[in-house]
Image (spheres, grey):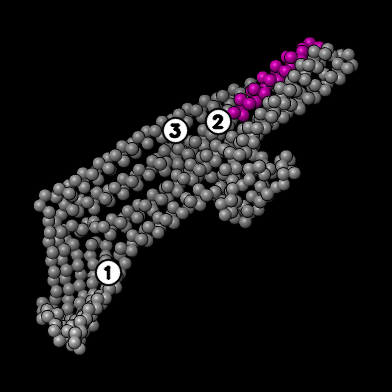
Amino acid sequence: MKKSRLVFFVILLFSVSNVFAQEVTDTLTWNSFVEIIKQYHPLTVKAKLLVDLAKAKKRQAWGGFDPKLEADFDRKIYNGTEYYSFLTPQLKLPLWYGIELKGSYSEAEGAFLNPENKLPKEGLSYAGINFQLGKGLLMDSRRAAFKQAQIFEDASANEQVRILNDLFYEAGDSYINWQNKSANLKIFQNALNLSKVRFDAVKSGFFNGDKPAIDTIEAQLQVQQREISFQQAQLELKQAEYGLSTFLWLENSTPVDADALNIKPQDEGILAILTSNDIKSNPKLLSYDFKIKDLNIERRLKAESLKPELNIGLGLLNQGRTPFRNINSTYWNQNNKVNVSFAIPLTFSKARGDIAEAKIKIRQVELDRDLMRNELDIKMKQNIAEVTTLQNQLNILKTTLSNSEALLKGEETKFKFGDSSLFLINSRETKLIEVQEKLFLVEAKLNKVQIKSLWLTGGLFENL
């Protein structure tokens, strides 16, 4: 549904005058309800922001591989004499496997230069490479940060599904409850109307001498009882509407005025019968997998500390601003810069402790995942059993409803011929109302169980 159509629909439903509030003319279907939530509910907007946040963090982590331009300038002048002047611009380019490319150009002049700082008049250019052969060869902080950002991106998409799954599970429960209370109100509205018609008929019969006075009292008592039941049904429907309104928002995070609701629910069920009971895609369960992946990156990074540090730098030197000028087979041997650094802890106590801690954290999350998987599996089995039972109850209640209607009709026929009493008719009608209430309640329970089953599979939002 396009956004403009949604805005029109929302305005149509909720910008109504209280003068017309009692005349329900618009049906808020389940699909329209879902679309409004998708467009305007704050949790939907928040869930979308999670993905944007993950992309920002990934871009931030990728910044660890951004090229870096630096420049150093150092000069000393004293008593009119320039002792030294150094200028060194350089460019660094980090690569994936712990490799860094480096290029620089240096100029040095002055009356008191140290011998190692003396450079050609044209300046000295440098092109080199630094790499790690020990600690940092397989994993370093830059690569770890980027891999964790990738995991966070996937985890955020999963968290978005979890938030929306939970949101629409609660919204579905609220809509089904609204349907049930609306159906109940119709039952008691009809029962109240019938009791009033019957009361008028009995009064007329009394004044004509056909009915005893006791029947008018019985009929009036029934009207009073039906009036109380109707008012209670009105209250329960209003409470259900308040619950429904918590999911109805307009643009700019503006909540809908619950007292202005002028809508009714659809009569049909909101979901088809569940065809899958696979919980593997449940976002709560998947979140543990992302945690384990993240902790494994940490473990691999800490495992690098069990290796000695061996860093090597190789570079080519040349006069002027072009480092690769006049290169031949012997040039490297005569114009190069090499640096090697080596370090190794004697006991590796910290590294071993860090790795042990990382493994324990991973095991803890694995156990939590196993508990969650079992919990979800049990809930799914309970749901499947409940669906079967409710479907059987629904079939029985449909037959019971048909029988109760037949009994009431028969009792009314007997009453016309003087073979029954108003008390028996009231009893039959009360029983019929109870069956109708029970039927609608079981239908609501069945809808709720089916929506819960989809929620358990993690596919509720995807099926809307």
Helix, strand or loop at mark 1: strand
User: Which of disc 1 and disc 3 is earlier in sequence?
Assistant: 1
What range of the chain is rendered magenta? 417-441
Q: Residues within 10 Å of mark 3 (few under 14, many from 20)?
A: many
In the picture as drawn, the residue positioned furthest to the top comes out as: 419
Residue 133 image point, x, y percent: 16, 61
Q: Residues within 10 Å of mark 2 (few under 14, many from 20)?
A: some
Tell me the kind of residue under disc 3: Met
Measured along the vertical axis of the image, is residue 390 above or below residue 7?
above
* Of marks 3 and 1, the one in the foreground: 1
Helix, strand or loop at mark 2: helix
Residue 274 located left or right of residue 155 = right
In the rendered picture of this protein, how many numbered marks are placed on residues?
A: 3
Residue 212 located left or right of residue 289 = right
User: Which of disc 3 and disc 2 is earlier in sequence?
Assistant: 3
Tell me the kind of residue under disc 1: Leu
Mark 2 to mark 3 CA distance (whole Å): 15 Å
Q: Are the residues flagged by discs 2 and 3 in contact, CB closer than 8 Å?
A: no
Q: Residues within 10 Å of mark 1 (few under 14, many from 20)?
A: some
Q: Which mark is residue 380?
A: 3
Measured along the vertical axis of the image, is residue 91 above or below residue 377?
below
Residue 418 image point, x, y percent: 81, 12
Tell me the kind of residue under disc 2: Lys
Residue 266 located left or right of residue 210 = left
Measured along the vertical axis of the image, is residue 305 above or below residue 408?
below
Q: Which residue does the image show at 63% across and 21% down from the upper left?
A: 400
Q: Which residue is mark 2?
A: 445
Q: Which residue is mark 1?
A: 93
211 or 396, which lies in front?
A: 211
Q: Which residue does the image show at 26% across and 70% down from the upper left?
A: 92
